[in-house]
Amino acid sequence: MSVRDWRVMLVPWADRRLWFIQARRGRRVVWGVVYDAADPDSVALARRAVATLRTAGADCSALPHPLPGAPGA
């Protein structure tokens, strides 16, 4: 299974404070992480994770840029 087959999307949780970044291959979730949009460290880690997925060739076109989270959250 190649990361290039993954489609990455964002799903809101808990009134848009928590967000679930999920990578799917077809209908199956193959990777995921939850981050807290109010926590600057959590937002920074989520942005790094997405940058790594993009670099590896995953389809991140469905993600907003930048990810939700206040500047400096």
Image (cartoon, rainbow, N blue to C red):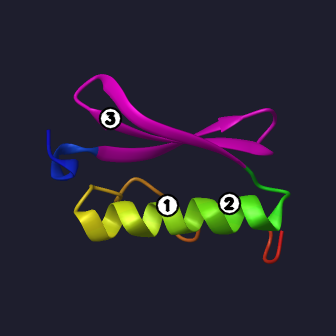
User: Can you identify the residue that label 2 sits on?
Assistant: 68
Tell me: residue 59, above or below residue 13. below
- Tell me the SS state at disc 1: helix
Which is more foreground, mark 2 or mark 1?
A: 1
On whether residue 57 falls in the magenta region, the answer is: no
Percent of width and height locating residue 73:
83, 68
Let me know if residue 42 appears in the view.
Answer: yes
Frontmost of labels 1 and 3 is: 1
Q: Which residue is mark 1?
A: 49
User: What residue is drawn where x is 58% and y is 71%?
Assistant: 66
Q: Earlier in the sequence, mark 1 or mark 3?
A: 3
Taking the spot 66% from the left edge, 38% from the top edge, the residue there is 12
Picture quadrant where residue 14 is located:
top right
Identify the residue at image location x=39%, y=53%. 62
Q: Main secondary structure of the magenta part?
A: strand
Percent position of residue 42, x then y: 73, 58
Residue 24: mark: 3
Label 3 neighbour load within 10 Å: few <14, some 14-19, many 20+ = some
Front residue (pair 15, 50): 50
Q: Which residues are magenta?
A: 7-35
The answer to whether residue 49 is left or right of residue 19 is: left
Q: Quadrant of the N terminus?
A: top left
Distance between the alpha carbons at the discs numbered 2 and 1: 14 Å
Q: What amino acid type should be assigned to the residue bearing mark 2?
A: Pro
Q: In the displayed structure, does residue 70 sit left or right of residue 3? A: right
Are circles 3 and 2 on residues that touch, CB within 8 Å? no
Whichever of labels 3 and 2 marks the residue nearer the N terminus, that label is: 3
Q: Amino acid at mark 3?
A: Arg
Disc 1 to disc 3, C-alpha distance: 15 Å
State how far apart marks 3 and 2 are (Cα).
20 Å
